[in-house]
Image (spheres, grey):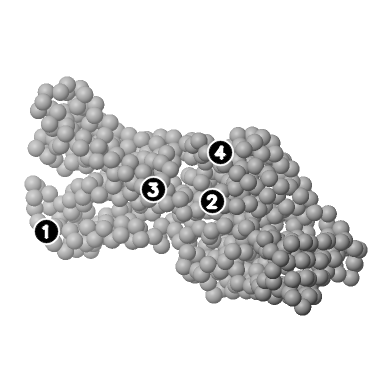
Amino acid sequence: MIELEGLSKAFRKTRVIDNLALKVGAGERIALIGANGAGKTTLIRCILGEYVAQGQIRVCGFDPRARRSDVLRQIGFVPQLPPPLKMTASDLVCFAADVSAADARRIGEVAGELGLDLSEISNRPFVKLSGGQKQKLLIAIALGRRTQLLILDEPAANLDPIARQKFFSLLAQRRDNTMIMSSHRVDEVAALVTRVIEMDRGVIAFDQHLAEDRLNSAALRISLEMSLAEPAFASALSQWGFKGGADGRAWAGEVAGPDRLRFLCLLSHYSGSISSASFDEAPCPETRHASGPVNA
Amino acid sequence: MNNLFLTARLDVTESLRARWFLLYTMVFGGIVALLMVFGLTESQVMGFTGLSRLLVTYIQLSMAILPIFILISTVRSVASDREAGVFEYMLSLPVSIGAWYWGRFLGRFVAIFAPVFLAMAAAAVWGGLKGLPIPWKHFFVYSALLLSLSICFLGLGFLISALARSSDVAQSAAFMLWLVLLLFLDLILLGIMLKERVSPELIVGISLMNPLQVFRTAAMALFDPQLVLLGPAAFTILDRVGPDAYLVWAFLYPALIGIVAAAIGFWRFKSSDLV
């Protein structure tokens, strides 16, 4: 689906992407993580053909600069920040639907599923909508089109918890789509992805394929020892169904396969307080569904 | 082609909601309204009366404000759209760069030319209703000159937007360009150059190259091609080539500048970062 070879991008003398190579197969769902300035947005813009870069980029078999329309017809994109468009919501939907030969009604349906009634906002300028409404509309346009590749740059940043949950469930339904989700919060997208790529200063610092069948079937039995009791951490662990010792320092519990990445992200926040941790994998088909707290 | 017209339509609807368009329409509509209110059609100055008097005043005012309005509004909106992330999103939709760029050019042209033309048309309709003779020849020639001038400065605006990476730089460049063209009008720097005995060929050459001067000379030549009105360079040119040939030059040359500038801007836009 995506092939990058020797990709480099510099702004004046600052190299933002440095000789990057990456292959993304059809159907892969990638969490693209990294600190600010790691090069995530630049990489996305290169894939969208918005930047001139050194190296080779192939998306759906085409160069996104030379065959923009062919490539972009296959891509649904949600930007990190909604653009300040003066056009009305309905103008935007109609334009996006017309240029991509999509059905505007389908976009309206997706918006409805996200809790956004298009008929209520159709005559309002896009720029005057609330942050959440803008984000929902952009998501609806991306998901309402028939695309092969979804590129989502911090897509859930402005969504309320219910819309966020609905959004992730809509994404989960699109099993055939290849997805790249840029996020600062890997825990948020952990249950959806099959691969995690971390960028750091323009290079891929970490690239991990997550074996989907194992994730869905194998639970992790986890024991933790804390150097000191942390009330916030204790509360979070309780929500995950963990049992704690009397002093609040020893904890044990089980995490379902699909939630292990999300749980490990939680642990990372308290890594300074953990004195020992053990993980045992055991087949556990009955824990296929998420056992952890709902994203909020 | 369909995407080009969709983009043009979108740009027109965007412009209709923009503050610059409201101000722009009010200025040109207001000029015509004020000229009517102050009874310019009933006055007589240097032989111009009725609608002719109104049109010649309108065209002089248009020459002063239309170029800077077009330049600033174009570079401001295009460059700030790029800075604010509008391009990042809109260019992620399946529209070719050509359809996007030329669609915006077309849409913006409609947005800037329509108020100027409609204000003049409204004056003609009003004059007709009052029983004044309508100078149709002047009306059509002025429309063509305004069209050519609009294309010229729109193209220059698109070129500046494609070259400049920030709206501040783009606005400064647009203002400087307008100032330079304004300075090289017959009655300002060219007059001084003539007085300082600079080569007449150079002065005539500059006059023919400056689209503002070309517009001004053509507009004035229709009414009274006298030295006192035209200025020395324009008078010399008209004397040599004749008013009809000069009119053809005045229609074609500014429009050609605009199209060439826009085409260079397109090449630059296409071959550099889009956002």
In the foreground, A292 or B167 = A292
- CA gap, disc 3 and disc 2: 16 Å
- CA gap, disc 1 and disc 4: 68 Å
Categorize mark 2 by other alpha carbons within 10 Å: few (<14), some (14-19), many (20+): many
Image coordinates of residue A29 in percent, x first then y, are 74, 54
Image coordinates of residue B109 in percent, x first then y, are 39, 49
Residues marked 1 and 4 touching at CB (< 8 Å):
no
Image coordinates of residue A155 in percent, x first then y, are 62, 61
Q: Which residue is mark 1?
A: B42
- CA gap, disc 2 and disc 1: 54 Å
The amino acid beneath tag 3 is: Ser
Categorize mark 4 by other alpha carbons within 10 Å: few (<14), some (14-19), many (20+): some
**Mark closer to the chain start, 2 or 1:** 1
Which residue is found at the position 60% from the left and 52% from the top?
A35
Residues marked 3 and 2 touching at CB (< 8 Å):
no
Residue B268 visible, this orientation: yes
Secondary structure under tag 2 reads: helix
Q: Which residue is mark 2?
A: B88
Categorize mark 1 by other alpha carbons within 10 Å: few (<14), some (14-19), many (20+): some
Q: Which residue is mark 4?
A: A15
